[in-house]
């Protein structure tokens, strides 16, 4: 479909408010032979139940509130176990409540939160569990890369020996040579993203890596698929994440500080080859901005560059369109105080800044270069305007596919509740994960944050969800 | 035609570790996969033809009205869902092919059959609305390079690998 009707584009509605109330996660590791997936799911659920200050005494008491469960797990073939959802549901002791598995590639976690939120918004359930996991350590990395690439078109693309790094390398190449001006400066911007995210992962006890790197390290790391290098690519992880969603009454029964949640989604072709050029669907703040409209004419006019082509993600633009319509956001850089983006690759982070309107198409690098994307702006030493991926993101902390979009929501929930330190700076938590809390841990609480958005993203942009979390007093509409 | 499935597992279990107990679970299934209605495309490659499809439905307001070609082909129009018409584009649009974007893959996934490093390209062609994913066996791609198709007609693999591209020579 390349023409959209008013009905197609209508802002999504919640029939009643939805609240995110509590969250939990396992730690994330490249290999986790010490624990079965079910054990990791239970760790995430126990943290959710017992470490979020909920007004319940036990797991059993919390379970008495839950009405249905939504499970995110993408790649059955990694663990060679079909219908793992039923196994996890049983281990969590939630039989015989209803449950369903959700599967949308890299966006699986985000889609799981989306489905769970819809169950509350519709009135079907007052209290639901969204829990996701992935187990990617049973096969070697080459097989793993092939398994993931099987989520591209098997006949036309996977067969070429493609990997997901390859897909994003095609995008990086095109972006770099067109919108990126073929400049070394753009390479440095990508490197700064890799450094920034890993820098934040340093202070995250859940993170798979704790490694300080420099721009030079990134640019000296080996090519995986030229022009993308080792440090441009995200991690592959084992782990689980969970979030509890409720209607208003249940939310306040369980918590003194629940956070409003809105989730919207978009999609686009699985084969990037099949993206037909269209006019850029404009976000509210772009519609009357003469400078932005001129920039789009300069970059895309006369067939100079295709939209979305290999440089943008229509699914992300659509998810943002729906999410902003749903929440009343009119200019995301003004109204969002933090974002957690699907930085599967450094290039896709830049592309997403543009898709969701933090910068116009063609200007994504400025989100980094201006310092806006940092917790503390390196140019001014002042708080960053809209910190991105202070969790450490997929580049530094984890990509356990079914859990990833949930981890992003959790990070924003804890930030908006002022609980960053509780979930990142407790020595006991570091010890639980077999680590020592670093002496130079960075306080990454974003002070005064009212709203944040998590973007969960699949394939080469086949599915994208935007989850907006807002403090209840900061609701825009 | 008959198919035999023989996926017997060895009787001995390979133990990788005792605490925790970690074992090997072998798996090497063969999938019997059909190209269905897309058969003309994969059949064509081995016969030196690049096949695309076009919506010829006069009532179609999107792809049909625009009249452009799809390659990769689709059996049905994505807009009106009517069956599309097969068009041989070997001597037409394929002669206008250019590199849209490209990469060099140094670490391919398992089961890769191309020589590494492999040069993957996205191909744009005049009158074709899509950008076909393919590869170059000879030469170094750059964005905008003019291409001509090369077909593996001598020993077709009946996969997308039967098509590759090289820099177009003056005709
Ligand atoms: Zn049609």
Image (cartoon, coloured by chain):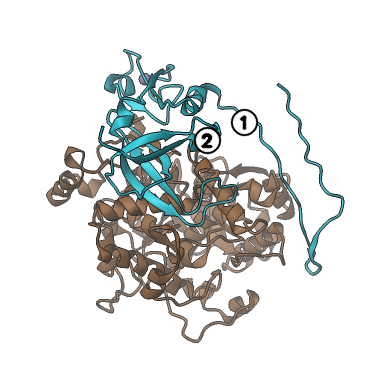
Chain colours: A brown, B cyan
Q: Is mark 1 within 8 Å of ligand 1?
A: no
Side of A180 where A338 appears, left or right: right
Q: What residue occupies the far bottom of the structure in this picture? A: A439
Nearest the viewer among A288 and B111 is B111
Residue A351 at x, y = what percent? 33, 53
Q: Nearer the viewer, residue A131 or A403?
A: A403
Farthest residue in the right direction? Answer: B11
Relative depth, front residue between A399 and B120: B120
**Count of marks placed on residues:** 2
Q: Is residue A12 left or right of residue A93?
A: left
The relative height of residue B147 versus residue B50 in the rendered view (above or below) is: below
Q: Secondary structure at mark 2?
A: loop
Residue in the picture at 47% in, 50% down: A18
> How far apart in space, not on screen, are marks 1 and 2 (Cα)?
10 Å
Residue on which disc 2 sits: A155
Question: Which residue position is annotated with label 1?
Answer: B33
Going 26% across and 59% down the picture, which residue do you hit? Answer: A334
Image position, residue A383 (x, y; %):
31, 74
Q: Quadrant of residue B95?
A: top left
């Amino acid at each position: 479909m390349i023409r959209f009707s008013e009905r197609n584009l209508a802002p999504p509605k919640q029939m009643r408010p939805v609240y995110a109330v509590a969250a939990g996660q396992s730690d994330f590791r490249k290999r986790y032979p010490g624990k079965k997936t079910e054990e990791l799911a239970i760790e995430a659920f126990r943290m959710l139940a017992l470490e979020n200050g909920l007004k319940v005494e036990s797991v059993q008491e919390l379970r008495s509130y839950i009405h249905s469960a939504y499970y995110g797990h993408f790649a059955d073939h990694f663990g060679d176990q079909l219908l793992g959802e039923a196994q996890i549901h049983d281990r969590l002791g939630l039989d015989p409540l209803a449950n369903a598995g959700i599967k949308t590639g890299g966006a699986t976690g985000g889609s799981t939160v989306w489905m769970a939120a819809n169950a509350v918004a519709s009135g079907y359930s007052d209290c639901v569990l969204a829990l996701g996991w992935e187990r990617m350590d049973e096969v070697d990395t080459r097989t793993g890369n092939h398994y993931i690439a099987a989520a591209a078109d098997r006949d036309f693309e996977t067969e070429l020996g493609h990997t997901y790094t390859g897909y994003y390398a095609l995008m990086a190449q095109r972006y770099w040579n067109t919108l990126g001006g073929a400049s070394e400066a753009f390479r440095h911007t990508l490197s700064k993203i890799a450094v920034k995210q890993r820098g934040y992962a340093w202070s995250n006890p859940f993170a798979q890596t704790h490694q300080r790197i420099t721009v030079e390290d990134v640019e000296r790391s080996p090519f995986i698929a030229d022009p993308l290098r080792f440090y441009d690519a995200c991690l592959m992880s084992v782990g689980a994440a969970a979030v509890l969603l409720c209607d208003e009454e249940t939310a306040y029964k369980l918590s003194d500080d629940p956070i409003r949640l809105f989730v919207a989604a978009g999609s686009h072709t699985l084969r990037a080859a099949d993206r037909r050029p269209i006019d850029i669907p404009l976000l509210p703040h772009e519609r009357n901005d003469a400078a932005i409209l001129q920039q789009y004419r300069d970059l895309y006019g006369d067939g100079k560059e295709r939209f979305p082509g290999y440089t943008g993600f229509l699914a992300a633009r659509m998810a943002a369109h729906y999410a902003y319509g749903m929440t009343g956001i009119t200019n995301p850089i003004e109204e969002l105080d933090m974002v957690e983006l699907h930085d599967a690759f450094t290039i896709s982070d830049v592309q997403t800044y543009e898709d969701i309107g933090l910068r116009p198409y063609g200007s994504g690098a400025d989100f980094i270069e201006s310092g806006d994307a940092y917790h503390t702006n390196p140019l001014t030493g002042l708080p960053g305007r809209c910190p991105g991926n202070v969790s450490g993101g997929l580049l530094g902390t984890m990509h356990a596919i079914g859990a990833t979009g949930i981890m992003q929501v959790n990070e924003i929930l804890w930030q908006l509740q002022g609980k960053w330190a509780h979930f990142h700076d407790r020595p006991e938590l570091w010890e639980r994960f077999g680590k020592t809390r670093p002496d130079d841990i960075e306080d990454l609480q974003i002070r005064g944050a009212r709203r944040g958005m998590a973007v969960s993203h699949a394939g080469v942009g086949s599915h994208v969800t935007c989850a907006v979390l807002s403090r209840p007093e900061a609701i825009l509409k | 035609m008959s198919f035999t499935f023989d996926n017997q597992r060895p009787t001995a279990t390979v133990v990788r570790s005792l605490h925790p107990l970690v074992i090997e679970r072998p798996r090497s299934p063969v999938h019997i996969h059909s190209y269905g209605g897309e058969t003309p495309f994969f059949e064509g490659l081995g016969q030196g033809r690049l096949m695309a499809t076009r919506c010829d439905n006069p009532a179609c307001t999107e792809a049909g009205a625009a009249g452009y070609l799809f390659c990769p082909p689709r059996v049905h129009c994505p807009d009106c869902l009517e069956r599309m018409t097969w068009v041989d584009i070997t001597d037409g649009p394929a002669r206008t092919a250019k590199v849209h974007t490209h990469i060099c893959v140094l670490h391919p996934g398992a089961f890769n059959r191309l020589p590494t490093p492999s040069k993957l390209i996205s191909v744009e062609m005049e009158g074709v609305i899509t950008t076909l994913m393919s590869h170059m066996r000879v030469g170094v791609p750059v964005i905008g390079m003019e291409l001509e198709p090369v077909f593996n007609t001598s020993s077709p693999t009946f996969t997308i690998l039967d098509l590759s591209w090289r820099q177009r020579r003056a005709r």
